[in-house]
């Protein structure tokens, strides 16, 4: 996932003008690849803090990178003076996304930036062939039961505005990918890993999963799944 999404994430951070000397916070850092890159970008004189509930995948071997085990629902991340706070593909998993965003906003210094990148599964509504749309309908029904919000992307700008951020803006970008590509492999691995749970939920039939996996292996099949929505804003003051 980080290989697929880091280039887009880096572009948004570059646009926000984060450079040497800045203090950055990444929430839900996963394997830490973005924070490792940030640590290099803010050197000399800067600091990249990365937090996650589970740091077992993160690689701490980067000068200027500080890893912390933390729950973004528990409160703001200290010392609350970050020039950039960012999170990617995290908020759709948390029980109370509004509370998490409020905590992240409270971690930004006055005048600092926040950048949130989350999925919006709008593109699956036009996926072809129709059997693939049936697969996604089952997937989304299952995810709703798991309390995963795969349509949170479209809600991000309003969340930031409500919290008083300035210069709020958002864009969404969608990869069009074909069978055998990196995204197809991502979905093949994810669905295969979850297959027993998906079928056990009664929301997806084995046959539907087989159809989807066959498409993922076909280079002639082109499709789109997620509109990754990047929303940013600036804390007032500063
Ligand atoms: C889908 S992964 C995304 C990882 C990384 N941001 C990326 O885009 O590659 C979601 C990450 O968020 C973390 N996470 C979920 N809920 C969290 C919370 N309440 N506080 C901190 N991290 C959380 C998970 O442990 C996981 O590492």
Image (spheres, rainbow, N blue to C red):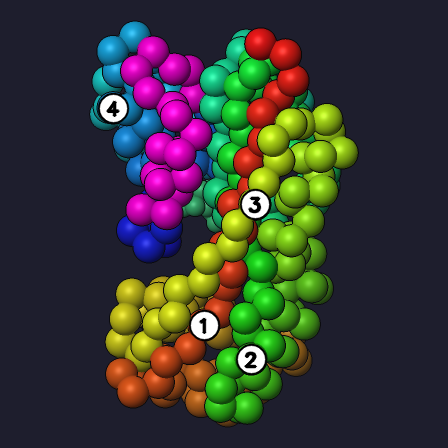
Q: Which mark is residue 224?
A: 1
The first of marks 4 and 3 along the sequence is: 4
- What numbered label is drawn on residue 170? 3
- Disc 4 or disc 3, which is closer to the eye? 3
User: Where is residue 203, by image quadrant?
Assistant: bottom right
Left or right: 100 as drawn, with respect to 191: right
Q: Residue at x 53, y 19 (%)?
A: 112
Quarter of image, res 146: bottom right
Q: CA distance from mark 1 to mark 4?
A: 33 Å
Q: Residues within 10 Å of mark 3 (few under 14, many from 20)?
A: some
- Where is mark 4, residue-wise? 40
Determine whether the residue tagged by mark 4 lies in a helix, strand or loop. helix
Calculate the distance from the C-alpha at mark 4 to the C-alpha at mark 3: 26 Å
Mark 2 in CB contact with mark 1 (< 8 angstroms): yes
* Gap between marks 2 and 3 measured at Cα: 22 Å
Q: Position of residue 78 (x, y in %)?
A: 56, 13
Relative to 31, residue 50 above or below: above
Which of 196/163 is in front?
A: 163
Quadrant position of the C terminus in the picture: top right
- The image quadrant of residue 183 is bottom left
Q: Residue at x 67, y 72 (%)?
A: 141
> What residue is at 76 percent from the left and 34 percent from the top?
162
Instruction: Look at the numbered disc 1 and give the secondary structure of its residue.
Output: strand
- Residue at mark 2: 126
The numbered mark, 2 or 1, whose residue comes first in the sequence reads: 2
Point out the residue furthest to the front here: 167
**Which of disc 4 and disc 1 is earlier in sequence?**
4
From where the camera sits, is residue 65 visible? Answer: no
> Percent position (x, y) of residue 122?
59, 67
* Label 2 Cα neighbours within 10 Å, binned few <14 / some 14-19 / many ≥20: few
Q: Nearer the viewer, residue 35 or 144?
A: 35
Residue appearing at x 43%, y 21% in the figure = 24
């Amino acid at each position: 996932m980080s290989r697929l999404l880091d280039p887009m994430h880096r572009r948004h951070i570059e646009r926000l003008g984060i450079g040497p000397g800045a203090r950055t916070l990444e929430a839900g850092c996963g394997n830490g690849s973005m924070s490792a890159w940030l640590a290099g970008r803010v050197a000399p004189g800067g600091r990249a803090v990365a937090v996650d509930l589970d740091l077992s995948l993160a690689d701490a071997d980067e000068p200027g990178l500080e890893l912390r085990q933390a729950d973004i629902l528990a409160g703001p991340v200290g010392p609350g003076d970050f020039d950039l706070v960012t999170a990617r593909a995290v908020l759709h998993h948390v029980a109370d996304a509004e509370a998490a965003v409020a905590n992240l906003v409270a971690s930004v210094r006055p005048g600092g930036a926040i950048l949130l990148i989350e999925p919006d599964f709008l593109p699956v509504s036009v996926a072809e062939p129709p059997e693939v749309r049936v697969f996604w309908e089952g997937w989304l029904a299952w995810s709703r039961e798991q309390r995963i919000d795969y349509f949170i992307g479209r809600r991000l700008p309003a969340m930031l505005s409500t919290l008083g951020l300035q210069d709020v803006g958002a864009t969404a970008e969608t990869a069009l990918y074909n069978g055998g590509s990196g995204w197809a492999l991502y979905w093949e691995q994810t669905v295969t890993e979850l297959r027993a749970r998906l079928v056990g939920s009664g929301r997806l039939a084995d046959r539907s999963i087989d159809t989807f996996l066959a498409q993922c292996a076909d280079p002639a099949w082109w499709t789109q799944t997620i509109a990754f929505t990047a929303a940013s804003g600036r804390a007032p003051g500063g």
